[in-house]
Image: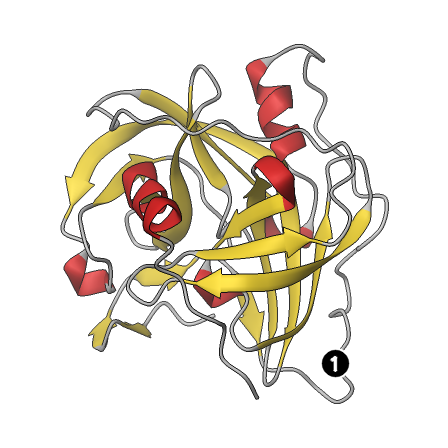
Amino acid sequence: MSSRLRIGGLLLAGLALAACVEPPTAPLDTPAGVETEGFEMPEVAATSVERRAQEVTVRVRSLGCEQFGLGSGFVLADGVVVTNRHVIEQPREVTVNTWDGRSLAAEVTGVATDTDLALLQLEDRGDLPVAELRTAPVERGEEVFAVGYPGGGPAQVSPGRVLGMVDGTVLGEPAEVIRVEVEISLGSSGGPLLDRDGLVVGVVFAVEVDAGVGLAVPVETLLERLDAGELVAPGVC
């Protein structure tokens, strides 16, 4: 993917959205080399915070009208999944893969118009673990970690720290976004950024390619959209 992307009406250099999005060929299908079944998790302690974070994080696969989207997301109560809007543009079919190898159908129930967030609803909620959201904002220097499925492969836990907050308006965001020193790869979009207690503090959506720095929508923005119900139906073909 090019490191020059048009975001929020501006052409930015050195910034790439952290999802794998490619134009499809007919018929739409999983790209070669992307394994959709039996992907593995890194070995971590069964009771660790990292393990729990992996269990609430999912891989999101979206077959759209003109593109294939592959990103990440995380599960909330009642089978709701949070991901990025750019992962599921004009969705025709959305599938969620869980930490234990299950493949679940999902429907896009709403997208935010002013921030890179979208909500999915799982058709089969099952007994999936759910993430907990933190209400307090992050602090500069705070230790955090990101979880995602880079490249559609195994779940990856990436530790790091918060560098601070930056103006989000140039990125099409309504408020400041979190700038974090953590490894973010294509396919990690929509995955959670968590504190050391395992609480979600942000939603990964982009990476500064040249600096190797990740960007995340703060959880306060997500909570505002959830509380206000400010979501609209996704685009159609």
Choose top left, top right, bottom left or bottom right for residue 42.
top right
Choose top left, top right, bottom left or bottom right for residue 50.
top right
Secondary element type, mark 1: loop
Q: Is residue 221 above or below residue 9?
A: above
Task: Indicate the position of residue 48 as horizontal and vertical percent values.
Answer: 61, 12
Q: Which residue lies at the image location 63% right of the left edge and 40% below the top edge?
A: 78
Q: Is residue 234 above or below residue 224?
A: below
Residue flagged by tag 1: what amino acid is it? Leu
Relative to 36, 134 lies left or right: left
Q: Which residue lies at the image location 64% right of the left edge and 67% below the top edge?
A: 62
Q: Label 1: how many residues lie within 10 Å, few (<14), some (14-19) or many (20+)?
A: some
Does residue 194 appear in the picture of this structure? yes
Relative to 148, 27 lies left or right: right
**Between residues 79 and 181, which one lies in front from this camera angle?**
79
- Say which residue label 1 marks: 28
- In which quadrant will I find the C terminus? bottom right
Q: Which residue lies at the image location 24% right of the left edge and 65% below the top edge?
A: 172
Does residue 218 appear in the picture of this structure? no
**Between residues 76 and 229, which one lies in front from this camera angle?**
229
Task: Indicate the position of residue 136 as horizontal and vertical percent values.
Answer: 27, 24
In the rendered view, how is the structure colored? secondary structure
Task: Indicate the position of residue 105 as horizontal and vertical percent values.
Answer: 75, 58
Name the residue furthest right.
38
